[in-house]
Image: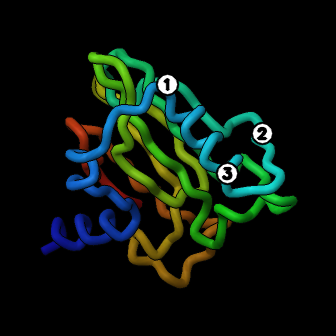
Amino acid sequence: MKKLLIALNLVAALAVSTAAQAQQSLLPDPEVYEKDYFKKQCAEVSFSDGFATRQDINNDGLVDVVVNEGKMTCDGSSSTKCDEDGCVNNFYLQVAEGGYFMIATAKTYGYDIQQRYGNKVLAMKMHPRFCDRPNADPKTDPCVITTRVRGTKFVTIFKK
């Protein structure tokens, strides 16, 4: 039962669509793709450092991309993609054949990539309700969900 609750909480935290993954075409560069998207959506848009981070998140030796939509300004507002749950982060994996595909979208306050027992894991800081603490203060006591990328899915290792 506990594993089911953890899985349900992660599903609520991460919007992963396996059907979309099967159908989506590979992107040559997720940063360019997302910047082009926002240039069409906003009359004025600017992107700050940290909008796109390039690093291996799944331990396969290929450089992946994480786009933090909270690091942009659209029509003068810097909070269009952020709220009390954090900012939208899109996680893209690179494939050996070339190109990238999105594996997950999550609203986070931030994340760290750590090496544990030879594997890379993501420690994502999220709203406390995702750790069954709905009344905790998100600023002083965020939920930390540690996940590992296995294949094309985020797998929760633990939450605290």
Q: Is residue 115 visible?
A: no
Q: Secondary structure at mark 2?
A: loop
Residue matched to label 2: 48
How many marks the image carries: the answer is 3
Where is residue 72 drawn, in percent x and y?
A: 74, 48
Identify the coloring. Answer: rainbow
Amino acid identity at mark 2? Ser
Residue at (54% x, 26% y) in the render: 54
Circle 2 crowding by C-alpha within 10 Å: few under 14, some 14–19, many from 20: few
Mark nearer the N terminus (3 vs 1): 3
**Nearer to the camera, 125 or 20:** 20
Circle 3 crowding by C-alpha within 10 Å: few under 14, some 14–19, many from 20: few
| Above/below status of 96 relative to 53 | above
Residue matched to label 1: 55
Which corner quadrant holds the C terminus?
A: bottom left
Which corner quadrant holds the N terminus?
A: bottom left
Q: Which mark is residue 40?
A: 3
Residue at (16% x, 70% y) in the render: 4
Amino acid identity at mark 3? Lys
Q: Which mark is residue 110?
A: none
Q: Quadrant of residue 61?
A: top left
Amino acid identity at mark 1? Gln
Image depth: mark 3 or mark 1 in front: 3
Where is residue 83 drawn, in percent x and y?
A: 65, 70
Mark nearer the N terminus (2 vs 1): 2
**Nearer to the camera, 137 or 21:** 21
Q: Is residue 136 left or right of residue 38?
A: left
Q: Is residue 131 left or right of residue 69?
A: left
Q: Quadrant of residue 77?
A: bottom right
Whole-angstrom CA distance, mark 2 to mark 1, is: 18 Å
